[in-house]
Image (cartoon, rainbow, N blue to C red):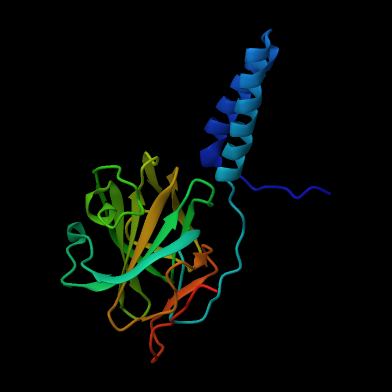
Amino acid sequence: MMPSIKVHKEGYPFITAFAFTTLIFFLLDGWAWMLAGFVLAILTLWCVYFFRDPDRVTPVEEGLVISPADGVIQSVTDASPPPELGLDLNTMRRVSIFMNVFDCHINRSPIDGKLISSSYCPGKFFNASLDKASIHNERRAMRMTTVNGDDLVIVQIAGLVARRIICWKSDDTELKTGERFGMIRFGSRVDVYLQNTATILAVVGQRAVAGETVIADLKADREDRKGETR
């Protein structure tokens, strides 16, 4: 039996448009139209793949911070949180996850907590892998408070191809770890800002899975995890 792919409803209009156009091209006479139809058929399959929305098995241990996005851990550094959130903090620990156009783009809550406030900031569309994307690119920043009262910030950042940031949750909403809260179309980045006392368990270059990969621990009393390519 072929495995089924769960597709998020955000993708229905795109998949329908690609599929309908593909059908039209195949009905036209000529090898050029046929070739274009094959190309569009491949794009239709890619669109289905892009908007996939698989279930994930989420660790539920208190204090664990789970990756909000599929992708590669691009950087772990200290940085100032987005100023539009009004946090009275000079720096926080930031983990950046870069998503390419083949990654699942459903974003998930990294921890149990309450969405206190969010702010949309228009901007540029630099390659999301560049560090300046955190400052200059179009973004949506969200401030959460954990059940223990710790501040945590999630920032959805548009990339070179992305043209829409989507958040399905409103302010004063309670979120569970691994709960879906939004997505970005089509290739982008998600930054997570944590308290300076957090232990970072993500390693630069590591591939993360949204809702499953542990990227930090707010309760551990140990050094950050280190890694190397082998």
60 over 46 or under it: above or below: below
> Which residue occupies 45% across, 42% down?
186
122 over 189 or under it: above or below: above
Q: Residue furthest bottom?
A: 221
Q: Quadrant of residue 197?
A: bottom left
Q: In which quadrant will I find the C terminus?
A: bottom right
> Which residue occupies 48% across, 76% down?
228
- Is residue 143 among what the camera can see? yes
Direction from residue 175 to residue 144 in the image, left or right: left
Q: Residue furthest front?
A: 230
- Is residue 94 among what the camera can see? no
Q: Residue furthest right?
A: 1
Direction from residue 161 to residue 2 in the image, left or right: right
> Which residue occupies 52% across, 70% down?
213
106 over 62 or under it: above or below: above
Foreground residue among 143 and 137: 137
